[in-house]
Image (cartoon, helix red, strand yellow):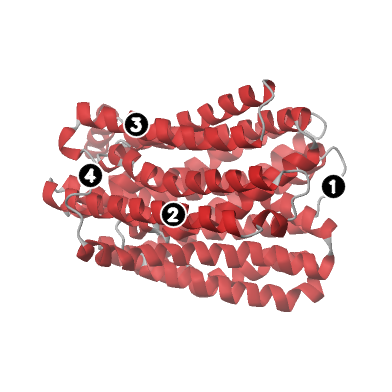
């Protein structure tokens, strides 16, 4: 299981890296072969069409969770029913929305509304249609690709998605180098979706014919059952938009663009931690779903404890490192053009440190479609948080953003979400919460002290100091987590069996 989780997390991290490297490669090429204004118009078109992705309303994750559980129970009839129903939903949705967007783009002056000046209206219309097709037909393609994930092989599903991203980057670069325009770039987006779907369909037909996607077994009743968890997933997305996009709008309206830039850069550093933790949680979802479906709650409790401990330790190690090295990192990254706000950055670090435990614990609920408490809690946390941000911005400026959002989550999430996860898996909540939060204080103190000592001992060697702080805080966090967060049964699972038997034997002789 641990090997499978590691491979999945590795594939997800590579996926994030490919997106970042793709931007680093393509943006200079766009600006070399197109004018800055023309590139900006293409970005504007893509941004406008991207809102169509919200029509998924969380269905993808709800469906994949159900399919994973059905596969774990070897219930092929339920698997086909859910798969066929969801695929029929996505095909109808993609086909109808693509036609609707084609009609709107053809008859309405959408390019003019967006403010395009360099792109010809007929080209812009075709680009809108192609990009709409790309966004909408990506949905059924992702469901088809998730076949491997439902079997417990999330890494394969993710690597196929990674390959598609690489294909987009390579083809886009070739199109730009050979003088291609906006229409060609939009077309290759659709082409990569078609190629990926075709490859997966052929592979599944050959290797797993009983799981081959279809629509013959679609049932409206199944879609009604999936509507509830999918809407709750959509509620999580809405809460995230309210919390973070709303905060940026508030700061922009009250303090101006420069403060927004400082806020955005500080948040970007925190997002690196958040994406890494999301990769771990996503990698764990198939196993959480499988264990819950099979009723293996003892294993589920162990995996839950280790997940919260591991993500907590990694987060606190990063927090301690960035606490001391973050401001200088921002200065180097921006080449001195942005003056870092040390307090703002550290408040964001406090936000992510306290956010990690309940977010990691909630993976149990999201993987099993039992995330009502998490969805409602986070939605109201965003409402409370943005209200506090609005109230505090006039007095403390951008510091209000991480402070307000952290207070909102403290009120609505810290207790309720972890309690709900413990209820799902049969973990005594009070004992778990007491052990974790007391350990949280100890691990935080140890990692911050370690970061401060290394930071003080190496004042000049910047790169060496960054590496030393990162390694030392991670070692200390892992050691502390091992001692204070894991129970003996958890340690036994992680230790090599031979070493554990020797250790256990020695302990017995000492008795």
Residue, x 75% and y 40% (percent of image)?
38
Q: Label 2 near label 4: C-beta < 8 Å?
A: no
Q: Where is residue 106 in the image (x, y as percent from the top left)?
A: 58, 54
Decide: marks 3, 4 in contact (CB < 8 A)? no
First of labels 1, 3 by sequence position: 3
Query: At numbered mark 4, what does the secondary structure look like: helix, strand or loop?
Result: loop
Q: Position of residue 88 (x, y in %)?
A: 28, 53
Above or below, comparing residue 477 to residue 206 in the picture: below
What residue is at 65 percent from the left and 77 percent from the top?
Answer: 387
Mark 3 / mark 4, whichever is N-terminal: 3
Structural distance between the alpha carbons of marks 4 and 1: 53 Å
Q: How far apart, in angstroms, are the residues tagged by discs 1 and 3?
A: 47 Å
Label 3, label 4: how far apart the Cα atoms are: 14 Å
Displayed quadrant of residue 248:
bottom right
Q: Which of marks 1 and 2 is in front?
A: 1
**In front: mark 4 or mark 1?**
4
The label shown at residue 360 is 2
Q: Which of marks 1 and 3 is in front?
A: 3
Question: Viewer-proximal residue, 2 or 84?
Answer: 84
Decide if residue 100 is on the left or right side of residue 257. Answer: left
The residue at which mark 1 appears reads as 338
Q: Earlier in the sequence, mark 4 or mark 2?
A: 4
Against 304, residue 336 (above or below) is above
Q: How crowded is mark 1: few (under 14 residues within 10 Å), some or many (20 or more)?
A: some
Q: Do the residues labelled 3 and 2 touch (CB within 8 Å)?
A: no
Residue positioned 62% across, 60% down in the render:
108
Residue 490 drawn at (x, y percent): 31, 45
Position of 474 compared to 114: left or right?
left
Query: On residue 126, which mark appears?
Result: none
Residue underneath mark 4? 214
Residue toward you, 366 or 170: 170
User: Which residue carries the number 3 mark?
Assistant: 198
């Amino acid at each position: 299981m641990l090997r499978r989780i590691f491979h999945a997390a590795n594939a997800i991290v590579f996926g994030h890296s490919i997106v970042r490297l793709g931007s680093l490669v393509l943006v200079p090429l766009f600006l070399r072969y197109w004018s800055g204004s023309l590139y900006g118009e293409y970005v504007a078109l893509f941004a406008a069409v991207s809102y169509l992705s919200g029509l998924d309303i969380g269905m993808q994750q709800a469906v994949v969770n159900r399919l994973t559980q059905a596969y774990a129970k070897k219930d092929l009839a339920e698997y086909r029913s859910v798969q066929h129903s969801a695929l029929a939903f996505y095909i109808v949705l993609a086909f109808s929305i693509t036609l609707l967007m084609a009609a709107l783009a053809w008859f309405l002056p959408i390019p003019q509304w967006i403010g395009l000046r360099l792109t010809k209206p007929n080209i812009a219309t075709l680009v809108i249609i192609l990009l709409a097709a790309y966004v909408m037909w990506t949905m059924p393609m992702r469901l088809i690709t998730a076949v491997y994930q439902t079997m417990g092989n999330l890494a394969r599903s993710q690597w196929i998605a990674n390959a598609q991203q690489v294909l987009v980057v390579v083809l886009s670069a070739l199109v730009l180098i050979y003088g291609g325009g906006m229409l060609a770039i939009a077309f290759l987006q659709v082409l990569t979706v078609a190629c990926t779907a075709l490859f997966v369909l052929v592979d599944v037909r050959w290797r797993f014919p009983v799981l081959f996607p279809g629509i013959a077994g679609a049932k409206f009743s199944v879609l009604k059952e999936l509507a509830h968890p999918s809407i709750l997933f959509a509620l999580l997305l809405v809460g995230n938009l309210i919390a973070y996009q709303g905060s940026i709008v508030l700061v922009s309206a009250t303090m101006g663009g420069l403060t927004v830039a400082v806020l955005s850069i500080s948040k970007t550093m925190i997002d690196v931690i958040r994406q890494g933790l999301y990769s771990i949680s996503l990698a764990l979802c198939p196993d959480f779903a499988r264990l819950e479906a099979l009723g293996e709650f003892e294993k589920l409790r162990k995996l839950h404890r280790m997940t919260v401990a591991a993500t907590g330790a990694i987060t606190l190690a990063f927090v301690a490192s960035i606490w001391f090295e973050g401001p200088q990192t921002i200065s180097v990254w921006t080449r001195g053009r942005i003056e870092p706000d040390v307090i703002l950055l550290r408040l964001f670090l406090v936000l992510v440190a306290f956010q990690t435990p309940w977010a990691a614990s909630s993976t149990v609920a999201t993987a099993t479609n039992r995330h009502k408490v998490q969805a409602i809690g986070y939605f109201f946390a965003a409402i409370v948080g943005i209200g506090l941000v609005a109230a505090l911005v006039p007095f403390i400026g951008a510091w209000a953003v991480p402070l307000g959002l952290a207070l909102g989550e403290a009120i609505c999430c810290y207790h309720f979400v972890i309690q709900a996860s413990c209820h799902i898996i049969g973990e005594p909540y009070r004992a778990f919460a007491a052990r974790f939060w007391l350990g949280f204080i100890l691990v935080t103190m140890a990692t911050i002290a370690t970061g401060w000592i290394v930071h003080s001992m190496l004042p000049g060697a910047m790169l060496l100091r960054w590496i030393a702080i990162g390694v030392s805080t991670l070692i200390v966090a892992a050691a502390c987590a091992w001692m204070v967060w894991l129970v003996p049964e958890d340690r036994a699972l992680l230790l090599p069996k031979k070493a554990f038997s020797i250790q256990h034997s020695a302990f017995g002789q000492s008795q």
